[in-house]
Amino acid sequence: MAGKPKLHYTKGRGKMESIRWLLAAAGVEFEEEFVEAKEDLEKLRKDGALLFQQVPMVEIDGMKMVQTRAILSYIAGKHKLYGKDLRERALIDMYVEGTTDLMGMIMLLPFQPPEAKEKNFALIIERATTRYFPVYEKVLKDHSQQFLVGNQFSWADVHLLEAILMAEECKPDILSPFPQLQAFKGRISNIPTIKKFLQPGSQRKPPADDKFIAQVKKIFNI
């Protein structure tokens, strides 16, 4: 029997957080080995564990997988969270790319200089409420189903909930104009595996604070 997946990354959200979310949603227990200093990253590189010299890296099923999208696709496919045919997979990919774009903007905000933060914060709210959330609101309204694709729980649903919660950390009432998304948030948050991941003490990571930002900048020479 294969052991638990082992995640190699910093002790924060970053690009690994969506992987944590997806594994948790699939009910998969995982271990974490944190990169806490530049030396930890260099050791992974010298050991040949990082195909492109970058984290995140996940040890799973005898592989040392890198590249966030490849890791997520593998987990989604393995755990039947990637649709039942090619068309559904294409829809899931499109919806995931949209939420990835939005979460990427939010993720980078704490690392930006103070003079840029106010402008980019406003841009995040504008994009969330006029470009991204209206799409998912319309999808849910048009097909009147519980989930985004094929009326079954998928990677797209997990990713959208993660994006919603990140956006709410920026603006708590951001879902006010989106009743379908409000209902969706309630439904998906109550799926047992996700409900467990949202509880205190889980492997979900908090938003980046000043200490974590300083650590990341030191590790990656930012």
Image: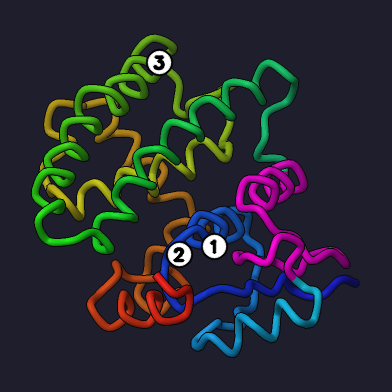
Q: Residue type at mark 1?
A: Arg
Q: Is residue 11 magenta?
A: no
Question: How many numbered marks have been drawn onto this rendered protein structure?
Answer: 3
- Amino acid on which disc 2 is placed: Phe
Q: Nearer the viewer, mark 3 or mark 2?
A: 2
Q: Earlier in the sequence, mark 3 or mark 2?
A: 3
CB within 8 Å, label 2 to label 1: yes
Specify the quadrant of the image occupied by residue 131.
top left
Residue 54 drawn at (x, y percent): 63, 65
Please name the residue that numbered disc 2 is placed on.
197
Residue picked out by circle 3: 144
Local crowd size for mark 3, using a 10 Å CA cut-off: few (<14), some (14–19), many (≥20): few
- Over which residues does the magenta segment extend? 50-79
The alpha-carbon separation of the residues under discs 2 and 1 comes to 9 Å
Residue at x 29%, y 70% (from the top left corner): 208
Foreground pick, 197 / 191: 197
By what rule are the colours in the image chosen?
A: rainbow
Residue 86, given in percent of the width and then of the height, sits at 74, 20
Left or right of 116? Residue 191 is right
| Location of residue 137 by image quarter | top left
Residue 80 screen position, x and y as percent: 72, 40
Q: Quadrant of the C terminus?
A: bottom left
Q: Which residue is mark 1?
A: 20
- 81 vs 57: above or below: above
Amino acid type at circle 3 is Ser
